[in-house]
């Protein structure tokens, strides 16, 4: 199985990166291949809303969006690991999502893609106690994934403890995320 892993945090070695590594530990096997698409190392400009993509189905901005689309087409499954900022996704990742409007227009022109959507998993983390902490991000992710031919089949919504050292992932949370990687690999989701 070929997995596209999106590390959506602007922090290269933060909690989202650690959660993604735990997920990949569970997912990895001799017959799997993973490509990591790491937001901190990408050049993805925000959408200009020039509407050129509504006519052509492609974005006029030439940057790493094209690389994402190639990886997306290549993959059998996808995982996104992201922190929650003010009840939403980080701006750097949101730029990629907003630029997916071109893919949406292509999909409209071609009609719905035949066949089942490929599976996707979300690893979302935040330290706020708010009841709706993950709601906005999950809604945005579900539409983004659908445009690229994926469906959210599982998620780990992690409320991280905060102390004087910052936010911390518990050993139980890390193990749950590792198990989720195995679950996606084995197709054990409903």
Image: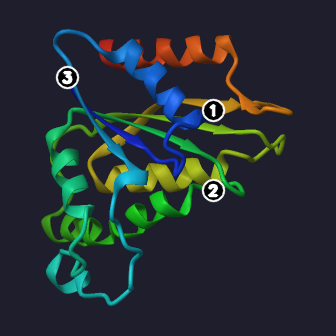
Residue 30 position by quadrant: top left
Please name the residue that numbered disc 3 is placed on. Answer: 1
| Label annotation for residue 88 | 2
Q: Would you say 162 lies left or right of 73 here?
A: right
- In three-dimensional space, the C-alpha distance between marks 2 and 1, rounded to whole angstroms, equals 13 Å
Helix, strand or loop at label 3? It is loop
Helix, strand or loop at label 2? It is loop
Please name the residue that numbered disc 1 is placed on. Answer: 157
Which residue is painted at 31% across and 57% down in the image?
A: 147
In the image, 99 versus 106, the foreground residue is 99
The N terminus lies in which quarter of the figure? top left
In the image, 91 versus 138, the foreground residue is 91
Q: Are marks 3 and 1 in contact (CB under 8 Å)?
A: no
> Which of pointers 3 and 1 lies earlier in the amino acid sequence?
3
- Disc 2 crowd, CA 10 A, few/some/many (<14, 14-19, 20+): some
Which residue is painted at 20% across and 37% down in the image?
A: 75
In the image, 64 versus 145, the foreground residue is 64
- Residue 190 visible (yes or no): no
> Which of pointers 3 and 2 lies earlier in the amino acid sequence?
3
- Disc 1 crowd, CA 10 A, few/some/many (<14, 14-19, 20+): some
Which residue is painted at 50% across and 34% down in the image?
A: 17
């Amino acid at each position: 199985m070929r997995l596209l892993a999106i590390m959506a945090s602007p922090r290269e070695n933060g909690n989202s990166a650690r959660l993604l590594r735990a997920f990949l530990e569970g997912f990895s096997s001799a017959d799997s291949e993973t490509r990591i698409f790491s937001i901190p190392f990408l050049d993805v400009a925000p959408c200009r809303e020039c509407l050129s993509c509504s006519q052509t189905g492609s974005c006029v901005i030439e940057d790493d969006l094209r690389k994402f689309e190639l990886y997306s087409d290549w993959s059998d499954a996808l995982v996104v690991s992201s922190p929650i900022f003010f009840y939403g996704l980080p701006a750097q990742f949101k730029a990629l999502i907003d630029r997916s409007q071109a893919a949406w227009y292509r999909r409209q022109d071609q009609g719905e893609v035949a066949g089942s959507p490929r599976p996707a998993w979300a690893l979302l983390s935040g330290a706020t106690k708010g009841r709706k902490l993950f709601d906005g991000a999950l809604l945005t992710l579900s539409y983004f994934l659908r445009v690229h031919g994926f469906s959210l089949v599982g998620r780990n919504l992690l409320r991280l403890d905060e102390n004087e050292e910052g936010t911390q992932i518990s050993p139980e949370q890390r193990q749950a995320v590792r198990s989720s990687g195995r679950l996606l690999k084995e197709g054990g989701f409903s």
